[in-house]
Amino acid sequence: MDPEAELIRQAEVVVELAGTLGVELLLIGAGALAGHGYVRLTQDLDLAGNLSLDHLRELAAVLRRSGCAVELREPDAEDPLGGVLDIHADFGQIQIISFEGRFPAVIRDALGEATLRVRRDSPLRIIPLPHLVALKLYAGGLKSKADIVEVLSRNPDADLDAIGLLCDRYRLPGFAEIRRELGR
């Protein structure tokens, strides 16, 4: 089987398992960038949600019972993330990143607006472009900035004013500079 297709299929299974626990997840990272037209190399898929530590632990146990090797990295007080669950299996790696207690608004809002799916009838939804930009600004760094420039250059119809307002609402600096770099 095609490894990329299997990785997506397994991510769909993870999303469904999380759903049985009352948790919603979205595709973020390089997978979401590809969904919005910018394809770059990646070895894993990143999913995001607002998961409590109890939900992360419960999901880790469910995934272990299904045969996956799982590592839970709990946050400390300085961590910008609310915990990360690394899932390793023959299909590759999936990371579940929790923004609970750190930046839950962007995930909550994105879940309410996400309609784009990796394929028709898939449970795996892709984070909307404005929220993806916000997450990249939150992550910071040159790679994230380059990702924003590349994905927006491939989406000339993107409403940059709306993206700017969203970033302002989340108090995320840096979008005006990126917009100047894009020249629009």
Image (cartoon, rainbow, N blue to C red):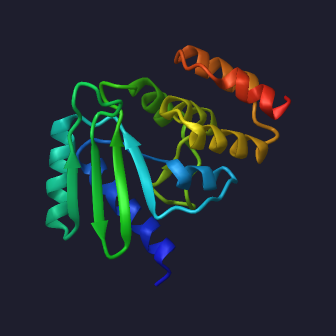
Q: Residue furthest bottom?
A: 1
Image-quadrant location for residue 120: bottom right
Q: Residue sitting at 16 percent across and 46 percent down?
A: 57
Q: Residue sitting at 65 percent across and 59 percent down?
A: 39
Q: Provide residue 14's location: percent of width, then percent of height.
A: 32, 58
Classify residue 26 as left or right of residue 89.
right
Q: Residue sitting at 78 percent across and 43 percent down?
A: 153
76 or 113, which is in the foreground? 76
Q: Provide residue 32's location: percent of width, then percent of height.
A: 56, 50
Classify residue 30 as left or right of residue 87.
right
Q: Residue sitting at 79 percent across and 31 percent down?
A: 181
Q: Quadrant of the C terminus?
A: top right
Classify residue 64 as left or right of residue 153.
left
Q: Residue furthest right?
A: 183
70 or 166, which is in the foreground? 70
Image-quadrant location for residue 166: top right
Say above or below: 29 vs 3.
above
The mark tally for this picture is 0
Q: Provide residue 58's location: percent of width, then percent of height.
A: 15, 47
Q: Provide residue 145's location: percent of width, then percent of height.
A: 63, 37
